[in-house]
Amino acid sequence: MRKFKRKKLNRGAVVNENGSVTTDADCGRKQKLAIIHQALIRDPVDIEILRNSSASKGGLLTDEMRRKVWPKLLNINVYNLPHKPGRDVRENHKDYNQVVLDVRRSMKRFPKGMPAAERAVLQEQLIDIILEVLKRNPQLHYYQGYHDVAVTLLLVVGERMAIAMLDTLSNFHLRDFMDPTMDSTKHILNYLMPILQQVDEELHDFMIRAEVGTIFALSWLITWYGHVLSEFKHTLRLYDFFLASHPLMPIYLAATIVLHRAKEVKQTECDMAMVHHLLSHIPQDLPYEVLISQAQALFSQYPPPLLAKQAALQSRKSLSISTFQAFQLSTLHQRPDVVLQRLTRAQDSTTSRHGLEAALSRDRSQLWQRGNRMVKMAVWGLSATLGAAVFAVAQTAMDWGPDVFLQLF
Amino acid sequence: FHQFPLKHISLLYFFSENDSLELFSSLENDNKQARTFKIIVIGDSNVGKTCLTYRFCGGSFLKNPEATIGVDFRERTVQLDGERIKLQIWDTAGQERFRKSMVEHYYRSVHAVLFVYDMTSLLSFESIPEWISECSRHSVGPLVPQVLVGNKCDLRESCQVPTSAAQSLADSHNIPLFETSAKDPSEKEHIDAIFLTLAYRLKSNKTLRLKQPSESSLREMRDQQEQDATSCRC
């Protein structure tokens, strides 16, 4: 316990060392919103400030701000969102029944005052977005609890953005939970006890003696606490934090919650059922801000590689962890929304360069229909023979990319 | 246990007439000497495992239950023939991926098993044999008392599982069958009876250890069981 107290002191220092960005926890709400706004319009977007603001006191503060910042945290272009899923998304999907069962039972996730009809519409959308993401990623497998993540996104950012965000999250942060089996999920849960051991050995030993395991934290981890918190605002606060953090952060937060309740745990009968029962019910009045900064402090003090040296964590590779660095790098060069909007309007065609083969051929025809006016005029101006020749060249150039194509004229 | 001769109707009377049950809400200051029995509740998604255990432990019907993620735990202490018995009920997630790698931890040292299917879903009933065999794969021995429960009997119009089919499945595995409804208030006592059937069986099995039974104690139990079968007609 003494060890942990020392840690608390360290944390204070860490927060202060982080400089101007994290100290905005102390400054007013308005000031914080202004800082976030500035970060959003910088070119490239200042992702560091956005991440720090998401984690620091109060998180992103408003849903309006979340709609702007969440996509940036996941490197999503808001002007190039997936289309609404059609009816066919529900056809022939192995997880269809399970998704419907879980979504229809998820009434508690919707705001209490919401009219039933409105909720019903959102529930149908929820089924669609889950199935859409699963269809786009055949390697991913649905798990009960995935719907709790999806609903949180849907309620804040709406259907199309929720698809884009869920798609990215599923391929990165939630990737380990979506294997055919839950072995990788178990592996992530295995990080919990080593963190506890570092901070409070007595508590750790007590829990080992009780054989409580870590399943009490399973729903916390795989739903990012969306399943266990009754106040939606708390869930949102944690989503701000997790979207801006390492995929293992939910486990570090789980550790701080257990540590926060260390006294209670140690006073309980040392028995699997008793300890599981106590821990699996999260008190609704947790000091989230304190726990979040403690989780950050634990993360920097005992980073995942340090914990992974423990025997139980060596055997397995986590996709979420191994791809995280590349994912973070990918978020560094985002253009602000104003620029993105202009770019998207001006050159729809650029998307085809990054797209798949199928998208390429589709966009190619679109280019002819609504492409650059100058291109069209130039083509029309040519004689029929020349035109045919140019067309042939242009077709080849298209394979190299629209930029080359445009340079031809 | 499989020789247990009482069918569900008579059980209801058996418990409500012959025994004065003093029921305690969960997690009171329990007498340390109360024996504890661990019951695991398994079955497909959405069959009503959570509602059944909630009805038994909390007394009321759980409105708008959500999917169970991982394992939930509920508890109720009952008094049977003057002895306090603590029943720990482990309510599990129905989705296959959970039971494959998560739930196994909870099969360990389990004292009794409750298989649940939804009477309005033939699929959930057809999964029961798989649940039963999975149970035995997790080294839940044949001596561990088991019951089969068909839930949602209040939805008579949409019933897809005829009692005769359920009964023959139950008979083929030598486990008693109950058809009930966690929702219907008049079935409340019946649900108590189901769990108390298990409690009675566990209580009378004196050789059952509180912690995980060792191989030798299992053997001992088996011998005892055989003796019971010949000498006792319950």
Image (spheres, rainbow, N blue to C red):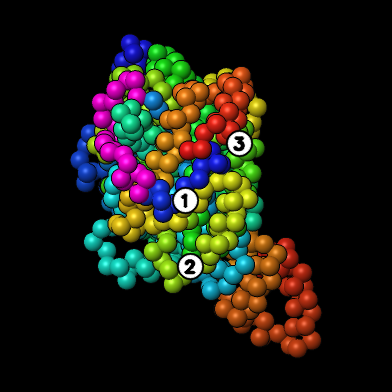
Which class describes the residues within 10 Å of circle 3: few (<14), some (14-19), or many (20+)? some
Name the element at disc 2.
loop
Precedes in sequence: disc 3 or disc 2:
3
Give the residues drawn in magenta, as a range: B13-34
Residue B175 appears in the picture as rendered: yes
| Residue A310 image point, x, y percent | 57, 19
Q: Which residue is mark 2?
A: B159
Residue sitting at x 22%, y 44%? A29
Q: Is residue B11 above or below residue B158?
A: above
Disc ID at residue B142: 3
Nearer-the-camera pick, B152 or A150: B152
1 vs 2, front mark? 1
Residues at marks 3 and 2, CA–CA distance in whole angstroms:
30 Å
Residues at marks 1 and 3, CA–CA distance in whole angstroms = 20 Å
> Which residue corresponds to mark 1?
B7
> Which quadrant of the rendered structure holds the N terminus of chain A?
top left
- Asked where in the image residue B126 lies, by quadrant, the reply is bottom right
Q: Position of residue A132 (x, y in %)?
A: 54, 63
Q: Looking at the image, do the residues carrying marks 3 and 2 touch, with CB atoms under 8 Å apart?
A: no
Q: Which mark is residue A77?
A: none
The magenta stretch spans residue B156: no
